[in-house]
Amino acid sequence: MAKVSIVKVKDVSKDVSRALKLAGAEIKKGDVVLIKPNICKATDKRGTVTNVDVVRAIVAWVRKMGGKPVVGDSPIPGNPDFESASGYSRLKEFRSLLAFPAKRIRLKKGKALKSVMLSGVNYDKVISVPLMKTHVQALVTLSLKNMMGLVPGRAKHELHKKGLHQSIADLNTAVKPDIALIDATWCMEGNGPIGGGEKKMGLLIASTDPVAADTVGTIVMGIDPMQVRHIVACEEAGLGTMDFEVVGEEIEDVASEFNLPFTYKSRPNILIGKAREFFASRVHVITDRLAKVTVNHDLCTLCRACIATCPEDAISVKDGKLHIDTDKCVRCLCCIEVCPESALRYSGIL
């Protein structure tokens, strides 16, 4: 059984230290510690990227423990200036992981992924610091999914194509966080990770077991963690446990139901989801052959975020409207993730 702390935030600096202490987190003197926030794009929209003040407090905690902090992330493709988001460009410890040569790592225990491209940044320990958000594909994005930021650029699309949930578990067999601290100060609900609405929670959730941290985080969001397939897959892979002991605040005192993304408006059926991932990882998109990504032209503002992220160059503008080439589209659904207006829809099963 893993210990998970829940702390209400009044003073960010003090409360980050308290959350980590209650969770039993520690590092060794001299450790190079990669602090991995979620900085998916350049934006000043609250509830979209990890609160930089939370990250600053973790930097101070690492230094106090005798460690050497490095803050790093890589964005959703098509966001080269992402470090300008919410003060990260002014954080001297910040490094864009796009600046480090990537290397392909073999995943001996991978089911969907047999190898993955990872940033070549060197570190001894990783602290995953996700922002608490719902997600149109993954249902939630917390400390385990946050590790996708170590996969550079369009190499992230490989995880989508092979079945996102199992791919997240496979990725974490190589880069599992040593400490998870979920930033639940200002969160995102609805059509995350970009197009949702802000939600104030005023919490921090921490553990040395990222599976347990994400399990508690999901429950706090009013979602059954057994319906989040990558959390279940990570436990099945031996990366942590969904059995937990809470210290600090009680779950029932802080939980607040999040609005779900449109893709999960009815609570997801885990058996259907597992079937889709099984086929997606083996027969590419055979289960989605008849499914399509469609555009609501009344909502689309032609911001072109989807065009920038599409790995197959299947999206273009024709006659003043967004056009999706269904023959080129591989249904990775990255375009739906990045749409700030929720103008894209998918007719298949997630």
Image: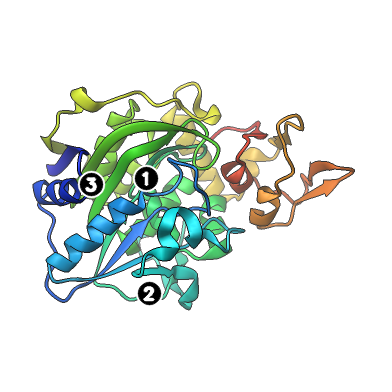
Of the image marks 2 and 3, the number of the one nearer the N terminus: 3
Instruction: Give the distance between the C-alpha atoms of the residues marked 3 and 1, in whole angstroms.
Output: 15 Å
Residue 50 locus on image (x, y percent): 38, 49
Per the image, the residue denoted by label 3 is 12
Residue 208 locus on image (x, y percent): 18, 52
Asked if residue 76 lies left or right of residue 58, the reply is right
Identify whether 173 is placed above or below 334: below
Q: Is residue 23 visible?
A: yes
Name the residue: 15% across, 41% down.
5
The structure's colour scheme is rainbow
Residue 110 locus on image (x, y percent): 40, 59
Per the image, the residue denoted by label 2 is 121
Q: Crowding near pointer 3: few (<14 within 10 Å), some, many (20+)?
A: many
Instruction: Give the distance between the C-alpha atoms of the residues marked 2 and 3, in whole angstroms.
Output: 28 Å
Per the image, the residue denoted by label 1 is 131
Residue 61 locus on image (x, y percent): 17, 60
| Amino acid beneath label 1 | Leu
| Amino acid beneath label 2 | Val
| Amino acid beneath label 3 | Val
Of the image marks 2 and 1, the number of the one nearer the N terminus: 2
